[in-house]
Image (spheres, rainbow, N blue to C red):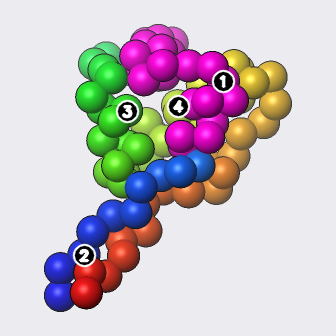
Amino acid sequence: MATRRAANDSLRILLSTADWTYEALARNVNALGAENGLSLCYDRTSVAHWLAGSVPRPRTRELIAEAFTRRLRRPVALTELVWGIPLPTC
């Protein structure tokens, strides 16, 4: 049975709340990666994929949560990001 990923509405809400563009989120994740010794090259298309249901690597998910934590000045847990649960297709 084929599966499709659910759109990540939680991430979309966080983007809106943070008043960030896709590019701004990608830029902040890349900067946090650099702070942690990682060379990342995410861009607006990466964010679009995440919104469509793609699940980034575990370390990237942590950086995304940290980026929102800093921007919103409140803790953003990984569970708040609700990463892609595959849904069965009919």
> Residue lying farthest front?
90
Looking at the rendered image, the quarter that the N terminus falls into is bottom left
Q: Which residue is mark 3?
A: 47
* Distance between the alpha carbons at the discs numbered 3 and 1: 14 Å
Q: Position of residue 50 (x, y in %)?
A: 37, 43
Q: Residue at x 43, y 36 (%)?
A: 60
* Disc on the earlier residue, 2 or 4: 2
Q: Position of residue 47 (x, y in %)?
A: 37, 32
Q: Which residue is mark 4?
A: 63
Checking the image for residue 3, the label placed there is: 2
> Residue lying farthest right?
74
* Disc on the earlier residue, 3 or 1: 1
Magenta stretch prevailing secondary structure: helix
Mark 1 and mark 4 in contact? Answer it, CB < 8 Å. Answer: no
* Distance between the alpha carbons at the discs numbered 1 and 4: 15 Å
* Disc on the earlier residue, 1 or 4: 1
Nearer to the camera, 2 or 58: 2
Q: Where are the magenta residues, as a range?
A: 11-35
Identify the amino acid type marked 2. Thr
Q: Residue at x 69, y 46 (%)?
A: 77
* Disc on the earlier residue, 2 or 1: 2
CA neighbours of label 3 inside 10 A, class few (<14), some (14 to 19), many (20+): many
The number of numbered badges drawn on the structure is 4
* Distance between the alpha carbons at the discs numbered 4 and 3: 13 Å
